[in-house]
Amino acid sequence: MTTLKGRVALVTGASQGIGRACALVLAQAGAAVALAARNQEKLAHVAEEIAAGGGQAAAFPMDVASEEQIKSAIQVALERFSKIDILVNNAGITRDGLVLRMKRADWDAVLATNLTGAHLCIQQVMSSMLKQRWGRIINITSIFGQIGQTGQANYAAAKAGLIGLTMAVAREVASRNITVNAVAPGFIVTPMTDPLPAELKEKMKSLIPLGRLGKDREIAAAIVFLASDEAAYITGQVLDVNGGMYMG
């Protein structure tokens, strides 16, 4: 069984959805978890869930669209846990609209959170990983960063950028025993997809060979694997977890 005992993981966007699932499963595998997101109340609930299961976690309120908040929150996390071994860049937002009418503010907001925020988080944890000559960086991209999506030019561009960022950083730090990979979910059941109309969900299912939406814990399982010693020879890769929707 995969064990992460003795490791410290930082998960952004950990208050709900995929981020919450990642935090819970990382803790179950033995890692101490630094929980980062904007919603302090929801973060506290996740920390309580982890503690109730016998795990260790602490909440660090942080908006990844703010460089100052990233720097200060990760510094406090490093002081609390002494190191960060695993970074899961999960935080993300959407500001959908057709490209012809997309506002510059909506473009900038999505790129700032979904791509620039990931880059800045990587910068802030890198010294800890370089010092110990061990690290795992896992970026949550999306199938729409691979195939595009109508009305989501900003989101698709940011998620495609994450794939390029993953490969570039993987090359830079491979000699220091730090791996950098991405996980690309397809349609996953989360608080973001729950309100969608039933007919739209059925349409989604028709595009997926396995015939169902994915579960957040299925994404989390892939992340725990990439964070483990078993994945030590995997870097610069995109692991597709989408029920067969993308077979490129």
Image (tube, rainbow, N blue to C red):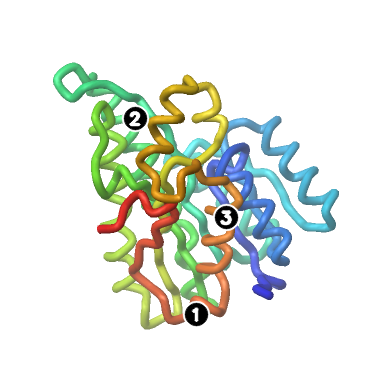
Along the polypeptide, which appears first: circle 1 or circle 3? Answer: 1
Q: Is residue 45 left or right of residue 26?
A: right
Instruction: Identify residue for label 1.
Output: 133
Does the residue at mark 3 contact the one at mark 2 (Cβ under 8 Å)?
Answer: no
Q: Is residue 153 left or right of residue 4?
A: left
Q: Secondary structure at mark 3?
A: helix
Measure the C-alpha gap from mark 1 to mark 3.
Answer: 24 Å
Q: Secondary structure at mark 1?
A: loop
Residue closer to the observer: 69 or 45 = 45
The label nearer to you, 1 versus 3, is 3
Residue at image position (41%, 25%) is: 200
Image height check: is 168 above or below 111? below
Please indicate, yes or no, whether residue 142 appears anywhere in the rendered image.
yes
Residue closer to the observer: 193 or 169 = 193
Q: Secondary structure at mark 2?
A: helix
Q: Position of residue 148 (x, y in %)?
A: 24, 40
Residue at image position (68%, 61%) is: 81
Tell me which amino acid carries mark 2: Ala
Crowding at dot 1, Cα within 10 Å, few <14 / some 14-19 / many 20+, comes out as some
Crowding at dot 2, Cα within 10 Å, few <14 / some 14-19 / many 20+, comes out as some
Instruction: Identify residue for label 3.
Output: 220
**Label number found at residue 109:** 2
The label nearer to you, 1 versus 2, is 2
Measure the C-alpha gap from mark 1 to mark 2.
Answer: 34 Å
Q: Position of residue 140 (x, y in %)?
A: 43, 51
